[in-house]
Image: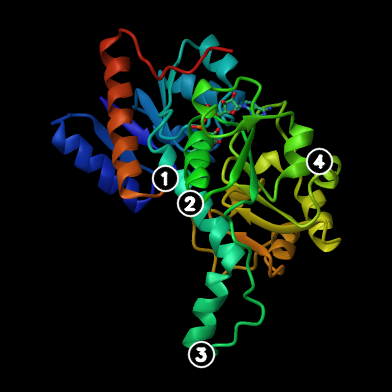
Amino acid sequence: MKLAMFSSQPYDRRFFEEARVARSDAVEIHYHETTLNAETAVLAQGCAAVCVFVNDVLDAATLEVLDGLGVKALLLRCAGFNNVDLATAARYGMFAARVPAYSPEAVAEHALAMIQTLNRHTHRAWARVREGNFALEGLLGMTLHGKTVGIVGTGKIGLATARILKGFGCRVLGHDPYPSPAFAPLGTQVPLAQLLAESDIVSLHCPLTDETRHMINAATLAAMKPGAMLVNTSRGGLIDTVAVIAALKSRQLGALAIDVYEQESALFFHDHSGDIIDDDLFGRLVTFPNVLITGHQGFFTIEALREIASITFDNLDCFRRGGVCANLLPAL
Ligand code: NAI
């Protein structure tokens, strides 16, 4: 059997080949660097399955091409599935499975790394010390102990983030329409308006859906505690970037840490250091001293990559052998 992997990077090949050899799996993986869309889908010719990542576009047009080529399985090597037209996939009778939890702690720990980098300015201190500048002016932070942190979406990653923040001695608030009982010992579930009004740091951990798109907008930014920090390690579309830039300019928003960006598919996961970046909103964001951006690396740990490869092979086994697959995506 042949499988076409899209958006593949050298580290994907490393961990997938490691898993394939360990399992003595005869699947032939064709690694493609390009993202999957209606134009590139033809690369899956002769393959029964495609393996995709966060910025691959599995809309109706792409799925139509894949169906025409005889592709019958969509293997997502990520948790979020906002990029897949599940109704169309179901209509074509395609098997679609994801990796729901490869390492919630990896993303939660990255959220914390971002919070503390931005709060204690370690990125600026690193550059200063290398130049022999040991002045502290401009590096003033706040003690996290005793601060209120709001977690929007208290699922697997939200819970992992709450556990770490509880360890820091923070007061943790949560907002989730389907709260997990596991959150109760960590904090208090409150309405979103209360969470925004009381939190010194707001961290987003809910999925991107029609309902959550631009949940951070001019109105919700105005409802936040003045000077608070906003953290997004979930999906870029949760934030209205134009509104966030306005809130940074007016000082209503005190700091912004994002590992995801609404228009990231044109930028992230590739080296554009020699290019002119044709995205004025992104260009404006990087000019703020109180904005920290990383290129969707929350998941990027050895443990998580191993788990992603391993669970994707489990999902592939389910497709080949039939039977129950715990990671099947719901047919919407
Ligand atoms: P999860 O499914 O365990 O938790 C998501 C939670 O959000 C659920 O409890 C759900 O009830 C809640 N939710 C749904 N709608 C909501 C709303 N309107 N307001 C508040 N909460 C809402 O998902 P998990 O594993 O915690 O992942 C969360 C997100 O993190 C994923 O959807 C994905 O987009 C993102 N992610 C980012 C990664 C990165 O590398 N930066 C890696 C993995 C996931």
- Colour setup of the view: rainbow
Mark 3 residue crowding within 10 angstroms, few (<14) / some (14–19) / many (20+): few
Label 1 near ligand 1 (CB < 8 Å): yes
Q: Which of marks 2 and 4 is nearer the N terminus?
A: 2
Which residue corresponds to mark 3? 131
Where 159 falls versus 12 (above or below)? Answer: above
Residue 288 disc label: none
Q: What element carries label 1?
A: helix
Mark 2 residue crowding within 10 angstroms, few (<14) / some (14–19) / many (20+): many
Mark 4 residue crowding within 10 angstroms, few (<14) / some (14–19) / many (20+): some
State the residue at coordinates (64%, 26%). 176
Where 146 falls versus 216 (above or below)? Answer: below
Which residue corresponds to mark 4? 220
Q: Which of marks 4 and 1 is nearer the N terminus?
A: 1
Which residue is nearer to you in this view: 23 or 247?
247
Mark 1 residue crowding within 10 angstroms, few (<14) / some (14–19) / many (20+): many
Which residue corresponds to mark 1? 106
Residue 110 disc label: 2
CB-based contact (under 8 Å), mark 4 and mark 1: no
Label 2 near ligand 1 (CB < 8 Å): yes
State the residue at coordinates (59%, 61%). 143
Q: What residue type is labelled 3?
A: Glu
Where 52 falls versus 147 (above or below)? Answer: above
Q: Earlier in the sequence, mark 3 or mark 4?
A: 3
Is 307 situated left or right of 63 in this image? left
Find residue 287 and report its horizontal and vertical position in percent. Answer: 71, 69
Q: What residue type is labelled 1?
A: Ala
